[in-house]
Amino acid sequence: QVQLVESPGGVAQAGTNLRLSCKASGQTSSLYAMGWFRQGVGKEREFVAAIIWAGNHTEYADSVKGRFTISRDFAEDAVYLQMNSLKRDDTALYYCAAHPRWAPQATLSRGMDYWGKGALVTVLS
């Protein structure tokens, strides 16, 4: 089992930056990938970004490519999401997620096995 705890979200003006962090605990040595998903009001949950824990390969949704950066810290068992040039459409509940075994990106983009409780990000225009 893996437990995930996100940092609190926040409120930001459009065009500014915000950083989310997520700390994993439990059986972190078995992790294959970690990622971020988000769900806006009245919207379905969507994939944002993922990182392969050992290889550092990253994937991004087209909507955030070039603005968001996912990174990880082995020593802290943490993953981060640097969100730059925020837009109002980025307003959502952001979930940290983790997956314990190999899966193709298409599968990871649909969801992972472990989830945090979410961090609310509100972008004001």
Image (cartoon, rainbow, N blue to C red):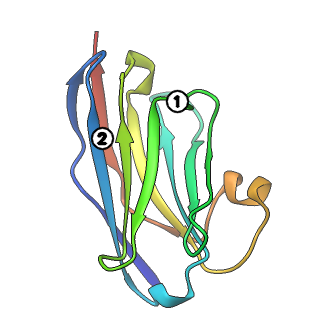
Mark 2 or mark 1, which is nearer the start of the sequence? 1
Residue extending furthest toward the top: 125
Residue 66 — which label? 1
Q: Residue at x 28, y 9 (%)?
A: 125
- Judged from the image, the secondary structure of the residue bearing numbered disc 2 is strand
- Judged from the image, the secondary structure of the residue bearing numbered disc 1 is loop
- In this view, 79 is above or below 19: below
- In this view, 63 is above or below 96: above
The image quadrant of residue 122 is top left
Q: Nearer the viewer, mark 1 or mark 2?
A: 1
Q: Residue at x 73, y 76 (%)?
A: 102
Residue 12: x and y in percent read 21, 25
Residue 69: x and y in percent read 45, 43
Crowding around mark 2 (Cα neighbors within 10 Å: few <14, some 14 to 19, many 20+) is some
Residue 44 — which label? none
Q: Residue at x 46, y 85 (%)?
A: 28
User: Which is more toward the observer, 74 or 5?
Assistant: 74
Left or right: 29, with 122 as reference point: right
Left or right: 94, with 124 as reference point: right
Residue 120 — which label? 2
Q: Amino acid at mark 2?
A: Leu
Q: Amino acid at mark 1?
A: Gly
Q: State yes or no: discs 1 and 2 in contact (Cβ < 8 Å).
A: no
Residue 43: x and y in percent read 55, 30
Q: In 3D space, how far apart are the residues under numbered discs 1 and 2 (Cα atoms)?
A: 22 Å
Q: Residue at x 61, y 80 (%)?
A: 100
User: Which is more toward the observer, 45 or 108?
Assistant: 108
The image quadrant of residue 50 is bottom right
